[in-house]
Amino acid sequence: MLDYIYDGSFDGLLTAVYEAYYRKETPERIMSEQCYQENLLSTKLYVETDTVKANKVYQAIKNKISYGALKNVFYVFLSELPEAGTIIYHYLKLGWKIGNQVDKHLTDDRVLTVHDISRKVGRERHLMLGFIRFRQLEGNIYYAPMEPQYNIVGLVAGHFASRLADQNWIIHDVRRGIGAVYNRKEWIITNIDVKELKFSEEERNYQQLWKEYFNNIAIKHRFNPVLQKSNMPTKYWKHLVELT
Amino acid sequence: MQLLDKLRILAAAAKYDVSCSSSGSTRKNTPGGLGNASYSGICHSWTSDGRCISLLKILFTNYCVYDCAYCVNRVSNDLPRALFTPEEVVALTINFYRRNYIEGLFLSSAVYKNPSYTMELLLKTVKKLREEENFNGYIHLKAIPGADFSLIEEAGKYADRMSVNVELPSSEGLKLLAPQKKHEAIIKPMSLLSSKITERKEEKKKYKQAPKFVPAGQSTQLIVGATPDSDLQIMKLTENLYGQFKLKRIYYSAYVPVSNHPHLPNISAPPLLREHRLYQADWLLRFYGFSAGELLDADNPNFATDLDPKTDWALRNLHLFPVEINRADYEMLLRVPGIGIKSAKRIVAARQVGPLNYSDLKKIGVVLKRAKYFITCRGRYYGATVVEPEHIRNKLLAGSKSYQPQYQQLSLFSLYPDIFAADEQLSRITGEL
């Protein structure tokens, strides 16, 4: 058994795929060092991240397979599942063999798994576009904490940069300790550590108005909390202003 | 009156309007402006009744000059009333939007003083949002029936979607429950909006810079269960509205008992299942290529309660089935119960690269517990039953949760099973009818 281990970055993963191709090896697994657990039976290869090699793979996905495949690969990478690297590796191998028709092979498990995970990540991204709640802080900065299952902060930031273009805002992935910070011009992903938050004067007022609205727009004759929870899973409730 | 009290009253007054969608518009943000529209729409929260919140849905006021029996805001109803100012609505919208609570504003109103006066207030509010606040989020605006056409037309320049609620499916129902409203007064603004939207679409083809006019189209709402109209009448009306006025959406609202008016049905709970069946049928009309006449006819004017409209149709047209998954065209696949638009598209894509077998269908997302009775896969039928309507119906119903089977364990000590009524048992013994 041969395991490839990369540093956990997207470039690292692409470099690992590059190495497998040029060394003419077929690694059993491609894993990030964060997820890797030692195993007596397997040989390990630590892949050194190389942006030139990574970029070659990136271009090869885009040109030899499709842009859609590239998006799928990136979304699966963001799922941060331990087996994500291996799944991507098998999908890409098939993709380079078949070309841009690979996403039509819906009955092939290598394709199906990638589509499944990619869809889940995409769905959470879409939900988060709705569930993110900004709080206005002193100094007119809008701050939104969130705890998504997948690492999607980079996928939602662009949406808010064009929508709330005239605001200073921070979207904070509390569990991962990272966030997107926007200064009315551009956004970056950076490490964030929040100690104390001071709300602006009118913040409590608008939170109260929003809660009042939320409670009065429901029709009690149609009370259906099961439906509510299936549309809005309770794991996201913690940071929703109207439900706290 | 405090803003909080106003919001409480005017949100509660707006809640019976079902429309919540924020889709269909591609409005972009402007330099220095706030907001944009998302083409697919975004839901921001779900309330305890399971309905989504996408827009800040409020009435401008619930002071009303009309006395429509089905409506909670009728003038004869004793309840707290409130009236916003345009500034208050603008402040709420902007501040909620900046916190990402909402996708935009859905502004409706009761008829205050007269229709044109009300429409002017609505117009003033959205104009302020767009021109003074540079707000580019989604705006859904009600066109008040009976208001001056020039006001409605001007409002269309600022709104993404406009709607006129038909409310009652037939003009008889309207006479009975809303004698002050005229059928024509509702239809006229709809046809005005529809022709303006079409006109502007043509212009857009020639000049890309032509200003927007209600880019997300118009919608309407029908109340279900307040009048004796059948599902067939409602579906025919639906079909006409989609065809004639090119409506984007029609919403169905199960009548919630808000009044004891003698002309209204005496019900304790809204007819939610009927509403659900109408939505299912609505989708069949818009996306599945069905017509109202196929789903219902004079002999069956209402939808079955135990099966969805598509399965019901399939059982009545069993001569068309089973269809071969690897050969049937897209339109026919769409008509198979258990196959939706996504799975039909996937089937068409997947079979370009190889034949599909039965286990592949599950992976693709076909609901096999329904579909298996109506398809063959590489020539084989997997339904394990005779292809007869009654057999398939029984099999389908046995799989549903609400089904109570009509049989029981027989006992040595009872002569006849309890499921037969007493006089039926007697006639079985005596042979008399």
Image (tube, coloured by chain):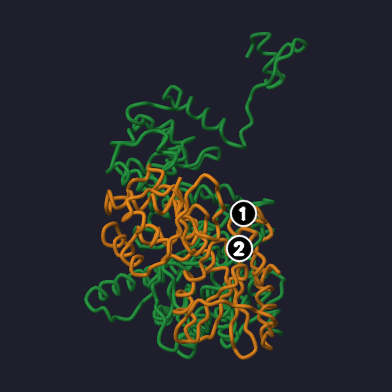
Q: Amino acid at mark 1?
A: Leu
The hue used for chain B is green
Up/down of A222 relative to B57, above or below: above
Up/down of B174 relative to A172, above or below: above
Image quadrant occupied by the C terminus of chain B: top right
Which residue of the protein is positioned furthest toward the left in this rendering? B206
Residue A223 left/right relative to B323: right
Label 2 belongs to which residue?
B46
Crowding at mark 2 (Cα within 10 Å: few <14, some 14-19, many 20+) = many
Label 1 is found on which chain of the structure? A
Residue B400: where, in percent of width, then height? 57, 36
Residue A222: where, in percent of width, then height? 65, 56
Visible in this render: residue B293? Answer: yes
Label 2 is found on which chain of the structure? B
Residue A212 left/right relative to B394: right
**3D distance between C-alphas at marks 1 and 2:** 9 Å
Image quadrant occupied by the N terminus of chain B: bottom right
Q: Residue at x 35, y 78 (%)?
A: B212
Label 1 belongs to which residue?
A227
